[in-house]
């Protein structure tokens, strides 16, 4: 389970550096790092939920559903603030070329 915390951290930290349109995202790199940290916190909550479920033998949907809802609200707030890039979002040749698409 720890891999689910390390791999997204490394990918979201270093993929924007390899982006061919890096100049577009340099001024918004803090937002990308905020999305990365939000994703890691969400994975950590799921990891703790897994450990607690294993220890107690029952699954609590209450706080896990709230954590997922809060993640989606915050993620949906910050995702439009990330400029067009090759690291985050829908990356196809069509969407990568056109700012409108």
Image (spheres, grey):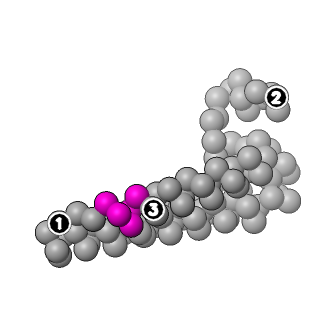
Label 2 – label 3 distance at C-alpha: 34 Å
Residue 100 lies, with reference to residue 85, above or below; the image says above
* Helix, strand or loop at mark 3: helix
Of badges 1 and 2, nearer the viewer stands 1
Instruction: Tell which residue pokes out farthest to the top in this image.
Output: 94
Of badges 2 and 3, nearer the viewer stands 3
Residues 27 and 79: in front is 79
Q: Which residues are magenta?
A: 61-65
Answer left or right for 6 relative to 11.
left
Marking on residue 15: none
| Residue 58 x, y percent position in the rendering | 17, 66
Residue 95 lies, with reference to residue 33, above or below; the image says above
Residue at 60% x, 55% y: name it. Answer: 73
Q: Which residue is mark 1?
A: 58
Q: Residues within 10 Å of mark 3 (few under 14, many from 20)?
A: few
Q: Main secondary structure of the magenta part?
A: helix
Instruction: Tell which residue pokes out farthest to the left in this image.
Output: 57
| Residue 98 x, y percent position in the rendering | 80, 28
Marking on residue 66: 3
Q: Residues within 10 Å of mark 1 (few under 14, many from 20)?
A: few
Ranked by sequence position, the earlier of labels 2 and 3 is 3
Ranked by sequence position, the earlier of labels 1 and 2 is 1
Label 3 – label 1 distance at C-alpha: 17 Å
Q: Which residue is mark 2?
A: 100
| Residue 20 x, y percent position in the rendering | 76, 44
């Amino acid at each position: 389970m720890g891999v689910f915390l390390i791999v997204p951290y490394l990918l979201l930290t270093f993929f924007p550096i390899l982006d061919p349109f890096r100049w577009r995202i340099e001024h918004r790199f803090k937002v990308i790092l905020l999305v990365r940290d939000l994703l890691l916190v969400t994975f950590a909550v799921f990891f703790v939920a897994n450990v607690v479920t294993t220890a107690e033998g029952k699954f609590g949907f209450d706080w896990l559903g709230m954590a997922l809802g809060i993640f989606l609200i915050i993620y949906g707030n910050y995702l439009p603030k990330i400029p067009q890039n090759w690291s985050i979002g829908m990356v196809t040749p069509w969407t990568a070329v056109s700012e409108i698409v």
